[in-house]
Amino acid sequence: MEKINSWLSQLAHNYLLIVIAAILFFGIKSVIGITTYKHYNKELQHLHKKLDSLLKKISED
């Protein structure tokens, strides 16, 4: 019985480490995703402004 209890506690400890690693992995992945999204969103907004100014300039001519 002692062996089973020790094996179960070791197994539970391993699952706890896996859960902690998964939470860290997806947390870091989320932060990277948000940062990337913000960067490309700024680039896209800059592109929209440039395109609007070019279309305005063409329509004025």
Image (cartoon, rainbow, N blue to C red):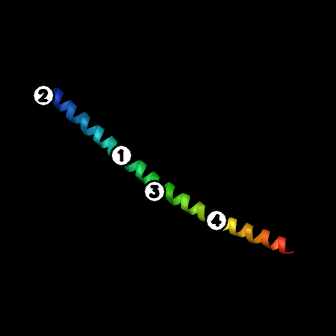
Question: Which one is in front, 13 or 44?
Answer: 44
Q: Which mark is residue 2?
A: 2
Q: Quadrant of residue 15?
A: top left
Q: Which residue is mark 4?
A: 45
Indicate which label's residue lies in the foreground, 3 or 4. Answer: 4
Q: Which residue is mark 1?
A: 21
- Residue 13 placed where, x, y %? 25, 39
Q: CA distance from mark 1 to mark 2?
A: 29 Å
Q: CA distance from mark 3 to mark 2?
A: 44 Å
Q: Which residue is mark 3?
A: 31
Seen as rendered, the residue at the extreme top is 1
Amino acid marked by disc 2: Glu
In the shown orientation, is residue 14 left or right of residue 56?
A: left
Q: CA distance from mark 1 to mark 3?
A: 15 Å
Q: Secondary structure at mark 3?
A: helix
- Which class describes the residues within 10 Å of circle 1: few (<14), some (14-19), or many (20+)? few
Q: Check whether the beta carbons of the residues at disc 1 and disc 2 lie within 8 A of each other.
A: no
User: What residue lies at 33% left-to-right and 41% top-to-bottom?
Assistant: 18
Say which label, 1 or 4, has the lower sequence index.
Answer: 1
